Image (tube, coloured by chain):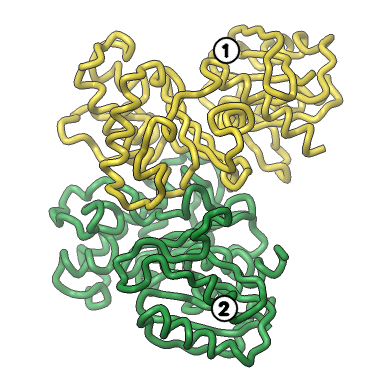
Chain colours: A yellow, B green
Amino acid sequence: MLGAIEGGGTKFVVAVGTPDGQIQHIESFPTTTPEETMDRTVEFFKDKGVCSIGFGSFGPVDLNKQSPTYGHIAKTPKPHWSGYDVVGHLKRHFDVPVGFDTDVNGAALGELIFGAAKGLNSCLYITVGTGIGAGAVVEGKLVHGLVHPEMGHIMVKRHPEDTYEGKCPYHKDCLEGLAAGPAIEGRWGVKAYELGDDHKAWEFQTFYLAQALMNYILTISPEKIILGGGVSKQLHLFPRIREQVKELLNGYVQHPAVLECGDDYIVPPALQDRAGITGALALAVQALEAE
Amino acid sequence: MLGAIEGGGTKFVVAVGTPDGQIQHIESFPTTTPEETMDRTVEFFKDKGVCSIGFGSFGPVDLNKQSPTYGHIAKTPKPHWSGYDVVGHLKRHFDVPVGFDTDVNGAALGELIFGAAKGLNSCLYITVGTGIGAGAVVEGKLVHGLVHPEMGHIMVKRHPEDTYEGKCPYHKDCLEGLAAGPAIEGRWGVKAYELGDDHKAWEFQTFYLAQALMNYILTISPEKIILGGGVSKQLHLFPRIREQVKELLNGYVQHPAVLECGDDYIVPPALQDRAGITGALALAVQALEAE
């Protein structure tokens, strides 16, 4: 059995599952202090006999295996978590491989191994919710460089009618600052799910997300794009985003998948609400294989 | 000895070199029809005894080894070259491995193996000239997905004082449409190299390139960024671009290289004017190793 942890900023989801991506037993609890949260995590796995654990973490995290702070949460506004050594904590209790990455890189790997991008060599997973995060697999490998992708903060062109200043504390009107849940709420005064399908908000949302997807396509050319998070519940957005990506690229990328930009290219997570935890399971699979 | 071909839209550069990146003999000639240009290329290598050939090509190209048109030039406005089978042409004359990629992916690999990114696992090479092209290495591998990167065409936010409509035939005011050589000339009426260092043009150029680099950093997190092409001759641009990338990211990416954004992170090509042909040599090295 494999262990999986989806360590989010507001809740932790823990599960055990099989190497073919089946979740067998799942629990969740609120994210409090690191000690309390990690103790509860350890408690869950104690008698489960896992042979590997995957941890998809909220970020930023240190993923550089040469670094003395590998496996730690990096500087975060979340109280008490800055510098906390999550991998070390797990390693002290379980003598098994630990696969550690961002939650969104985990989700990308999960969709590649078990989900919408099964059998492919690359994919992009993007989630739009309280923030915008993305992970990617390129040439069969999760993308890491200096650090991990932080694609949710790219700059985008403003919609000509959008006067909202933007909500990102770092960049104000980057993609996340204009198109994540809090920006939608800040701009319109109501939560995204309260807006009707024909609300102007979705025109803005389509405009920003289509631009972002265009930029990602031009940069890493993913074979599949999985759009998850709260926004993926708004199924009416998918055809609009596909159409606008196609219009924006205007025939430039000469591959049928992009030229058509059909409903098999930009898709909701095949793993649905379990994209995150199944992604963590994929990290456990990968860690076991790497041994 | 290894063979290297930098197949550009206006000229072909051919060379032989050693596995450690030394170019021994180099020639160039104008790109005319594919038959004539490739015959001349074959002629050059005929008695050189090369054991592998690297071809860094103008794009778009088909790099999918499963595709029946692998190694062909894709649809291009360049007369006669659409669909031309360059790898097939070489294979008919030389029974050696052929490494084939875009010129900019080749240049990225060249800088990784022999140049500014030596010893690293990732880098981004971007060239700003008559167009804007970029290649990248992620986790030790050249980036390919559906196709190859076409990062020069990402969307960017317009400089508030820039009223130029943009020059890209596909996207009008994408990065290339606003910041490549023809856009500079179209906007100011003179060629880039004729503009003084304090011309307003460089403020715009810095604005667009810094935004693009920010987006690439957030997307693939390269360990080194190499900025080549005509613009890299404008050395005064480098400190300005570094400063603006740093300001735009505003401390968000918590890695010293990006936080400082110093003169060892965004750099001119170590291989200077030979970045392209040495990149092709790197493709030959890689093709030989893959055998």
Q: Quadrant of residue B235?
A: bottom left
- Which corner quadrant holds the N terminus of chain A? top right
Residue A59 appears in view: no
Chain that bears disc 2: B
- Residue type indicated by callout 1: Lys
Give x and y (percent) for residue A271: 55, 20
Marking on residue B32: none
Instruction: Choose between B99 and A75: the one closer to the eye.
Output: B99
Instruction: Choose between A205 and A234: the one closer to the eye.
Output: A234
Q: How many numbered marks, from 0 up?
A: 2
| In the image, residue B275 above or below residue A143 | below
Q: How packed is label 2: few (under 14 Cα within 10 Å), some, or many (20 or more)?
A: many
| In the image, residue A239 above or below residue B149 | above
Q: Is residue B290 left or right of residue B103?
A: right
Q: Residue at x 40, y 71 (%)?
A: B229
Q: Quadrant of residue B73?
A: bottom left
Q: Is residue A132 left or right of residue A14?
A: left
Marking on residue B4: 2
Give x and y (percent) for residue B146: 48, 48
Give x and y (percent) for residue A290: 78, 39
| In the image, residue B53 above or below residue A124 | below
Q: How packed is label 1: few (under 14 Cα within 10 Å), some, or many (20 or more)?
A: some
| In the image, residue B56 above or below residue A273 | below
Give x and y (percent) for residue A193: 33, 11
- Residue type indicated by callout 2: Ala
Say what secondary structure mark 2 lies in. strand
Instruction: Choose between A54 and A163: the one closer to the eye.
Output: A54
**Residues at marks 2 and 1 on the same chain:** no
The nearer-to-camera label among 2 and 1 is 2
Identify the residue at the far bottom of this view. B47
Q: Residue at x 32, y 14 (%)?
A: A192
Which residue is label 1 attached to? A11
